[in-house]
Image: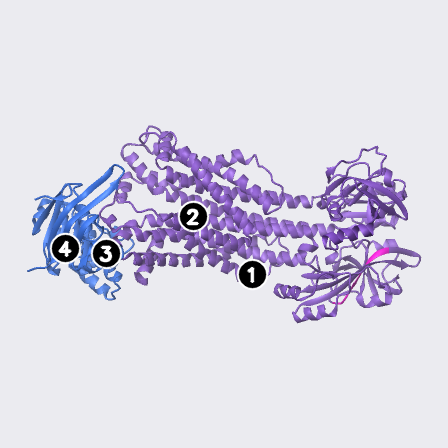
Amino acid sequence: MNFNLVRRMAMRDIRSGEMGLLLVALVVAVGTVTSISLFVDRLQQALVQESANFLAADRQISSSREIPDSFRIEAAAQDLRIAETMTFASMVFAGDVNQLVSVKAVDASYPLRGKLLVADEPFREGDVATGVPVAGEVWLDSRLFPALDVALGDWVEVGLAKLRIGRVLISEPDRGGSFFDFGPRLLMNIKDVPATEVVQPGSRISYRLLLAGDEENLEVLKGALPLEPNFRWVSIRESSPRIGSALDRAESFLLLGGLLGVLLAGIAVALSAHRYAARHYDHVGVLKTLGATPRQILFGFLSIMLLVGSVAICGGLLVGGGLHLLIVELLSAFIPVALPSPGIRPLVLGAVTGLICALSFAMPAFVHLKGVSPMRVIRRDLGVPPASLWLSYGAALTGSVLLLIWYSQSLLLTFWTLIGAVAVVLVFGTLSYVLLKSGRVVGMQARSGWRLAISGLQRRSRENTLQILIFGIAIMLLLVLVLLRTALISEWRAQVPEEAANHFLMNIASDEVTAVQQLIDDNATAGDFLYPMIRGRVVAVNDEDANSYQARLSASRGDSGPRLMSERNLTWTDTQPINNTVVSGQWWAGDTDRAEVSLEKDYADDFNLSIGDELSFDIGGQLIKAQVSNIRTLEWESMSPNFFIILSPPALRSFPSTYMTSFFLKRSEKVFLNQLLTAHPTITVIEIDAMIEQIRSIVDRVTQAVELVLGLVLASGCLVLVASIQASRDARMAEHALVRALGGTRRLILSSLAAEFAILGALAGIVAVVGAELTVAVLQSQVFQLEVSVHPWIWPVGPLAGALIIVIVGLLGSRSLINTPPMLVLRGLN
Amino acid sequence: MSRTVVSAKNVEKIVETAAGRLVILDGIDLEINERETVAIVGASGSGKTTLLGILAGLDSATAGSVHLVDAELSQLDEEARAGVRGEYVGFVFQSFQLLGSLTALENVMLPAELRGERLAEAQAVELLEKVGLKHRTTHYPRQLSGGEQQRVAIARAFASNPTVLFADEPTGNLDTLTGEKIIDLLFDLNQAFGTTLVMVTHDSRLAQRCDRTIAIEAGRISP
């Protein structure tokens, strides 16, 4: 067949609607992928940009050693922008008053991402700073002004350097959630550091080299630098694990959603291609009698498919592009950052997806046409040899696997999705077939709609089994997505509860406890109780010196992990704190008189400590011993004070301690901090409200994207239902036209169709519910690292909704079955 | 003496069904000469349509040999049989079998297009003129009456300038008057093109217009 003939046949098929559903299914596949990828691509870029603000850079290299010049030279060679910071704790003096502060010294390029906010008065909303403190100047946290009793223009001493207070520092992008740099911030110019003379051999200083630039160049740099073991490469995922895991899961979900959308559209493509092929058997028969060879038929119909595929891809790209613009427009009010321009990748992704869909889902049906016998032209009763199962399922499976791997970039996700799909098909295919086959009735049972429906279901049991599976898989995929979305969003929301503590108070003296507690109760929206906090270090394990214990441990493990003898915050309490779960051993009795200790699980694992071990602590020069009686896990997301080491009251009660607590403060209530610090100037306040707000805004945006994807996939799901009903329409039409010709009323046909679709839908709903529960359980545990849960509500909802949806879509799609005169139907069939 | 263009020797067609072996054709021997017109008649289920399909290379025999013009069909695969059909054979069917997605003109151009010939259009217009449908060239089959559709089908059958024309109940779907006109047209064109005509029919009057009648009964040629 020459190209002109192919073109004419294709265009005519498109115009006459023969190709309609195939075309729409392909357009939806391409459009779904393109719009999701375009939007996700831009959203991810925006999220990464915004998340980068947490680092004040795209990446950081951090170390307790000075960053060598070679690193800067290499970074410059990769065309990356760099900035440097040094962070250390120091006492700052203003006349007779002193305060422990966290000093951050920065160079003029700081920050590379995000903004410094400054003000001219403490506790105010900040404005964006145009630079960093000039040499000789410092910017102080609001709370340092009452603590040091200073004002702008006053002088403070940092080490040996005398520096002038230039601005109030409201926020800095990379303040982050690290509790390492305790204390209020003092920002100074890195050029002033030598004059302070605080940097001495052995000083604990955190050096950071901030990097910004192309992702590729950053990766090249990472590979080129000798980072191990002294320099740590930090990206947003390592620096802020909470945001990192939210982003990871969101990406997995979006990819999974996009993928399921495409697979659903793929099923619709396969169904409509098979229907198109079935309606062209006679066509092929005629062509063959006229001398068309099987090769010509194959070439001709594949050309038609590619031509239609190309039209669909172009249409899909346009639809996808338009849809994504619409989404961006709709969400523009919620997305404060300007979205970066999309790359070319989403368009390529859309086009290639369309091609893979056409080749793997539609092609087998077209290839099958070459086997149609020309005898069919004179012998209509001649069937058509069934399509090769190997080719049909092999191609669809190969296409699905290719798409799965390409989208998810994860063999694990691909593997589990396939296992889920194959298991569902095998188990429920057999089950549905057996159910439909059992109790075979004789004749068409045309006395009532209900009986007519059951006899029809049984007579076409093979086709109906397939239809149940297709409906079931479509509903299952939608349920999987709905359940995962709910699980993910509630998980994210739970990470940052509405009134999670957003301020920490530390260094509360024991004689201040009552007054501070009263102030918090009166002014803060929600508060915690005050924990005593005592600094101490572990000096021996089971009477073995901690140094030698650690040396032995490191030798056996071959690494140098955290140091056992580091000074840590200890607390004591008689009751088990909320959000702490004992995983082995038992919490001590409230009236215990023994010195017992409870360890956090990771801490215990790091130092190979277990229940029964005896730890010796050095607290301000005094030694105490306590036996490990239980191991706990913590919810770090709870934002409550958390401790690695908790002792029983008898162990620590007699030691002088300071107290700490956390509470929630609305932005409008922040002026309370001024009142608090004026009354108790030595208290240290750590504000994490800005960080929480940032996390929440990211979670909200990711949630929007997830819901958007869900909507698009729902559209694909409906398409599959329509395609599947269309595919079985011809067989139903023939039977019902006959029943009508023999005197069956329209009401009988209508009730029979409704009953048939209801049974199919309900069975499909059962398939979907079981499949969804299994798939979600596997995905939750294997991919999303969430807790596995059962969802009792879907068990009744699945079959009912399945029946309802299929009845509605089915009856709408079968209107012509009822409205077309039976004579026309019968004549068309002969 | 005319050469033989269609011959069958001891042709059998047996199909395996759930109920056992079903013999459709049983030892058919026949020869049809060039330019001859032959009617194959028989009751429903006698095997006449199956025989037509095998003689035309649309189907293959279970046993025996079938010769069509220069080709031994029983030794050819479907690809090669299609080539033979394209080169030597024309068809007219009871249900017309026009492609609904092509116009009358495009339907007539189809055989030549399948052979990759370029001058298909002029020849097709000429043929449509011969069957009296020059004014209907751009119409689609559903816009034509049954008689008009069969005329288009006849024009298409002669478009490949066939050596043998196979017709399967060509008037079966038409009223008597239209049927007679169609048959006149078919025989006229057959005469003009010098084609051999092999026709399956129930219609004894139609059979009588042929040079020879072959009667099939229970899969055998009845004497």
Label 2, residues with CA under 10 Å away: few <14, some 14-19, many ≥20: many
The type of residue carrying mark 1 is Pro
Q: Nearer the viewer, residue A442 or A139?
A: A442
Alpha carbon distance from label 4 to label 2: 48 Å
The type of residue carrying mark 2 is Ala
Alpha carbon distance from label 1 to label 2: 29 Å
The colour assigned to chain A within the rendered structure = purple
The colour assigned to chain B within the rendered structure = blue
Q: Nearer the viewer, mark 4 or mark 3?
A: 3
Residue A342, disc: 1
Q: What residue span does the magenta drawing correspond to? A: A100-108
Does the segment drawn in magenta span residue A284? no
* Label 4 chain ID: B
Alpha carbon distance from label 1 to label 4: 68 Å
Q: What residue is shown with label 3?
A: B76
Do marks 1 and 4 both belong to one polypeptide chain?
Answer: no
The type of residue carrying mark 4 is Val
Q: What residue is shown with label 4?
A: B6
* Label 1 chain ID: A
Rendered view: A235 above or below A679:
below
Residue A579, disc: none
